[in-house]
Amino acid sequence: MPKRQRLTFQISYRPFQACPFGYAGILLPMQSRWLMMLALAGLLCLAPDDKPKTFVERLPGTTVQFEMVEIPSGVIEMPDPESPGKILRVPIKRFWIGKTEVSWDEYGTYAFNREIAEQEKQRGADAIAKPSKPYGAIDRGYGYEGNPAIGMTYAAAQRYCEWLSRMTGRKYRLPTEAEWEYACRAGVLKREPLPVEQLQKIAWYRDNSNNKPQPVGKKEPNAWGLHDMLGNVMEWCQGLDGKPIACGGSFKDPAEKVHPGARERQTPDWNMTDPQYPKSRWWLSDAPFVGFRVVCEE
């Protein structure tokens, strides 16, 4: 009789990547190509070693491009802003989100580039209003190339998304608050402040930013491949209550205020030194700490 062949198996766990149940395990036969699924203290699902899916978006008529990352569907639990102590379970559909915050290279193409008028006209993007010039330096003296676009109002960020949608033929918009936090936590982080040793690796904040925004994508990404979800600049989102909210903390904040649950609402101080009356609907003269990233539905 032929000898029986003994198969050995190795089970490993890694943070949730593509598995909608929160954590994933892989069952790999040492001497077989078969992939199997187990039930072990709950359901384990296969999590491929592949990196998250991405695509590169290119702005017509320019050399400007940026990368989008696929975020799987799931559910996130968040405090109800209208009922203290109540927890909401918010379902999240699959979507794509910017790998980094929108940079001046991208936003400036919309706001200031007049050499792509023909491409805009062909795509109907010329119908989207463009920002007036801000009061003071556009980049607030922090630098332009590679840096996050800063100081725009929530409405201005929305107009950019509308323009981008016309230019590319895809549906772009700002993230919802739930989508943003879901992508930020990436199946791994909690809402609370992180240990400083961990935060230093992924975020720019008061103690390491030299009190200014830094070029996008220089810190380590989170578990889903997204850079600067925490710190650098707060990011405009549509709040759970439907109102604008800025998420994640910024370069000006101490470590304890830079975390997935960090939120701020716009106040009059954000536009205090703008001498115009009425105040600009495009720019926040005193908010160089706020920017945004985009979501693509398909």
Image (tube, rainbow, N blue to C red):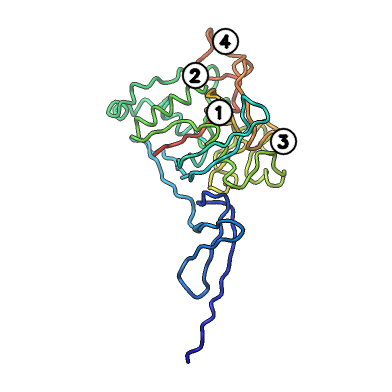
The three-letter code of the residue at mark 2 reads Trp
- The front one of 117 and 25 is 25
On residue 275, the disc is 4
Tell me whether the residue at label 4 lies in contact with that at label 3, contact meaning CB atoms closer than 8 angstroms.
no
The three-letter code of the residue at mark 1 reads Leu
Residue mark closest to the camera, 3 vs 1: 1
The three-letter code of the residue at mark 4 reads Pro
Distance CA(mark 2)–CA(mark 4):
14 Å
| Mark 1 or 4, nearer chain start | 1
- Classify mark 3: helix, strand or loop: helix
Asked if residue 61 is positioned above or below residue 13 in the image, the reply reads above
| Mark 2 or 4, nearer chain start | 4
Residue under numbered circle 3: 256
Distance CA(mark 4)–CA(mark 3):
34 Å
Q: Is residue 249 visible?
A: no
Residue drawn where x is 71% and y is 47% of the image: 197
Distance CA(mark 1)–CA(mark 4):
33 Å
Distance CA(mark 2)–CA(mark 3):
30 Å
| Mark 3 or 1, nearer chain start | 1
Residue under numbered circle 2: 282
Image quadrant in which you'd find residue 264: top right
| Left or right of 188 on screen, residue 61 | left
Q: Which x, y percent locates residue 210?
A: 67, 35
**Within 10 angstroms of label 4, few (less than 14), some, or many (20 or more) residues?**
few
Residue drawn where x is 46% and y is 69% of the image: 34
Residue under numbered circle 1: 240
| Mark 4 or 3, nearer chain start | 3
- Classify mark 1: helix, strand or loop: loop
